[in-house]
Amino acid sequence: MNYHAYYPLDVVNGPGTRCTLFVSGCVHQCRGCYNKSTWRLTSGQLFTPEIEDRIVTDLQDKVIPRQGLSLSGGDPLHPQNLSAVDHLLQRISDECPGKNVWMWTGYRLDELSGDQRRTIARVNVLVDGKFVQDLHDPSLVWRGSSNQVIHFLR
Ligand code: SF4
């Protein structure tokens, strides 16, 4: 998996103070996409064990406690991202107790494959659906268009 950006301290993408990772790769091609540069799987830089370690360490930080991790992109549920995202989420589950995971995907919850459903088993909140420019509403919190749904999964 490649990623575009990692913000160790973020107060915009999800509730509270968080870590945020923008991964590479998205098939949805939404008109008006704010992040077109992330569409290619090979864009950005390689998601290495070192950056994974950094995220886990940041989530364990006691000086500036984070509520959890936000995963966006690109699309964390792109089929070719699933194994790396699974590995990261497994580590957060094992090594960062009490931290929540929010994820943004262009897929709708009801159209996820079996593999994608296995990945979201460790996700607390899923914001789903493509960005639809005609339904864009800047007053919405944590989503860009009114078709997108915030699913509080667990
Ligand atoms: S799902 Fe998100 S990243 Fe992908 S094309 Fe749509 S708005 Fe862009």
Image (cartoon, grey):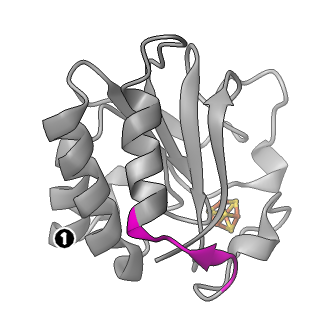
Q: Position of residue 111 (x, y in %)?
A: 32, 64
Q: Nearer the viewer, residue 75 or 140?
A: 75
Task: Work out whether residue 126 can be spotted.
Answer: no
Numbered range of the magenta stretch = 43-49
Q: Is mark 1 within 8 Å of ligand 1?
A: no
Left or right: residue 154 compared with residue 46: left
Q: Position of residue 76 (x, y in %)?
A: 46, 62
Residue drawn where x is 70% and y is 72% of the image? 38
Left or right: residue 56 compared with residue 71: left
Count the labels in the image: 1
Left or right: residue 112 compared with residue 13: left
- Tell me which amino acid carries mark 1: Asp
Residue drawn where x is 79% and y is 62% of the image? 33
Q: Nearer the viewer, residue 13 or 34?
A: 13
Residue drawn where x is 24% and y is 18% of the image? 98
User: How many residues crowd around disc 1 within 10 Å: few (fewer than 14), some, or many (20 or more)?
Assistant: few
Magenta residue check for 77: no
Give the residue number, with chain letter if any, for mark 1. Answer: 115
Q: Position of residue 55 (x, y in %)?
A: 45, 44
153 shown above or below 82: above
